[in-house]
Image (cartoon, grey):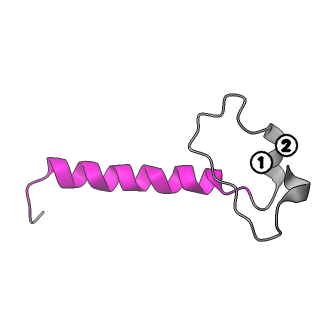
């Protein structure tokens, strides 16, 4: 799969990884799913804050 991809392609995955992507893909510079997971954490935190705190805080 990696050999056929373009140099500037980005590999993303929503996780959990169950037979979806081989672990060796983690080492490829085009694998951005760990950053995707990290960004998703902050998005969820912001959404929870917006829903749970009164407006203006």
Q: Residue at x 9, y 66 (%)?
A: 56
Q: What percent of the width, then of the height, locates residue 53? A: 14, 52
Number of numbered discs: 2
Decide whether the magenta segment is chiefly helix, strand or loop.
helix
The answer to whether residue 46 is magenta is yes
Magenta span:
31-55
Q: Residue at x 16, y 47 (%)?
A: 52
Q: Quadrant of the C terminus?
A: bottom left
| Placement of 30 over or under 52, stated as above or below | below
Residue sticking out furthest to the top: 18
Q: Secondary structure at mark 1?
A: helix
Quarter of the view holding residue 24: top right
Residue 22 shown left or right of residue 33 in the figure: right
Which of the labelled discs sits on residue 48, or is there none? none
| Placement of 6 over or under 37, stated as above or below | below
Which of the labelled discs sits on residue 26, or is there none? 1
In the image, 8 versus 28, the foreground residue is 8
Q: What percent of the width, then of the height, locates residue 5? A: 83, 60
Q: Residues within 10 Å of mark 1 (few under 14, many from 20)?
A: some
Q: CA distance from mark 1 to mark 2?
A: 5 Å
Mark 2 and mark 1 in contact (Cβ < 8 Å)? yes
Q: In this figure, which residue is indicated by the disc labeled 2?
A: 24
Residue sticking out furthest to the right: 3
Q: Residue at x 82, y 56 (%)?
A: 28
Residue 24 shown left or right of residue 50 in the figure: right
Q: Residues within 10 Å of mark 2 (few under 14, many from 20)?
A: few
Residue 36 shown left or right of residue 9 in the figure: left
């Amino acid at each position: 799969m990696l050999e056929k991809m373009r140099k500037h392609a980005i590999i993303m995955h929503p996780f959990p990884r169950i037979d979806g992507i081989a672990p060796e893909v983690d080492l490829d510079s085009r694998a951005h799913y760990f950053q995707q997971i990290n960004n998703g954490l902050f998005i969820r935190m912001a959404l929870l804050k917006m829903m749970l705190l009164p407006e203006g805080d």
